[in-house]
Amino acid sequence: MLAHFWDAYPDLRHEFSNWVLRIGSWQAATARDKELVARRFAEQVARTGSLPELFGVVEDWSERGRDELWLARVILTTVLIDERTDYEVRSKLYDWSRNPRGKPGLGGLLVSICATELAVGHPKQALIRLRWLCDHRSPTAQSARAAIAELCEDNRTLEQFLAVLTDRDRFDSELCRSIVTPRRLTGIPGRPSPLAVRRLAIKVVETWRLALDRLSPTDWSTAVQPWLEQHALAAANDSQAEASALLAAMLELCGSQVDLLAQLYTTNRAWLASGELAGWRRSAAAGVENAIRDALAVKPALSLSLEGESR
């Protein structure tokens, strides 16, 4: 019967949509009744491809109350996982995410949908949309960053995120540093460290070089100090493989640039002086200093300069 009216009276679909729009205020209906109506509405939309009406309902419901927001999620998820409408819905998610002036209710819904349903079958598309949502106002931006960080606990997703991050004209250095943290790079229990996977380690270093590019010496040092801290913690916890990988990555961040190696040397000394002079910190700082000296062994002029600083 429902399908008959939906098919026989297409001019009334807008009125049907408006009727559905008001179910949140139905006092006599239970939450289950409302969800059932919402699902049936979404199923008819998926069957007939009349998505604009549904998108309008989603935008309206997402800015009302908690109950309506849940119903918005129900109908959006229904058409997203339906193969008849999934492409158009993913396209609409992209359009919504590209609008930095989007409303917070819709923004929060998009973050949730992208981080769950969309990420299951299309993880890179989910990351792209979450990346754009990071440009929205908070709390949407904050939620999007948290969602990306959680998804990137998986190394394959982290690699996809690095590709997404570097595939835009406006590289986001801050987003890179907040997601691809030295702590994350030491790995998650039960999973290998990203730095232990050579292909991924190379991509991490390339991305971090972009993140550090054009920073002032002060900002450069601020960004690198967490690497020194994590290296010291790994060494103190007898995680020598992780400590060695972090140290090697720090040296690769500098490459063959003498000025960056000198900056790392200065940053290492500042990091040591900024905290307690515990033995584990001294030992880690000495290890970094020795590695820098080894890297500069073929550059006697700078080596002499560093010798002067150590006296």
Image: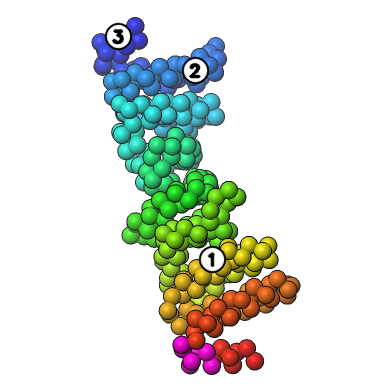
State which tag comes first along the sequence, 2 or 3: 3
Q: Which mark is residue 245?
A: 1
- Amino acid type for the residue under numbered disc 2: Lys
Q: Position of residue 304 (x, y in %)?
A: 54, 93
The question of residue 299 being in magenta is answered with: yes
Please state which of the two labelled residues, at mark 1 or mark 2, is closer to the viewer: 1
Of residues 40 and 187, the one nearer the viewer is: 187
Q: How is the image coloured?
A: rainbow
Residue 271 image point, x, y percent = 63, 74
Mark toward the viewer: 3 or 1: 1
Residue drawn where x is 41% and y is 59% of the image: 199
Q: For numbered disc 1, what is the local secondary structure?
A: helix
Q: Which label sits on residue 4?
A: 3
Q: Would you identify the image quadrant in which residue 218 lies? A: bottom right
| Cα–Cα span, label 3 and label 1 | 65 Å
- Seen in the picture, residue 225 relative to 141 is either above or below; the reply is below
Residue receiving disc 2: 34
Q: Residue 202, relative to residue 24: is it above or below?
A: below
Callout 1 amino acid: Ala
- Residue 185 visible, this orientation: yes
> Label 1 near label 3: C-beta < 8 Å?
no
- The quarter of the rendered structure image containing the N terminus is top left
Q: Find residue 94 and report its horizontal and vertical position in percent.
A: 35, 42
Q: Earlier in the sequence, mark 1 or mark 2?
A: 2
Residue 311, placed above or below residue 39: below
The crowd level at tag 1 (other Cα within 10 Å; few <14, some 14-19, many 20+) is some
The span shown in magenta is 298-304
In what element is the residue under mark 2? Answer: helix
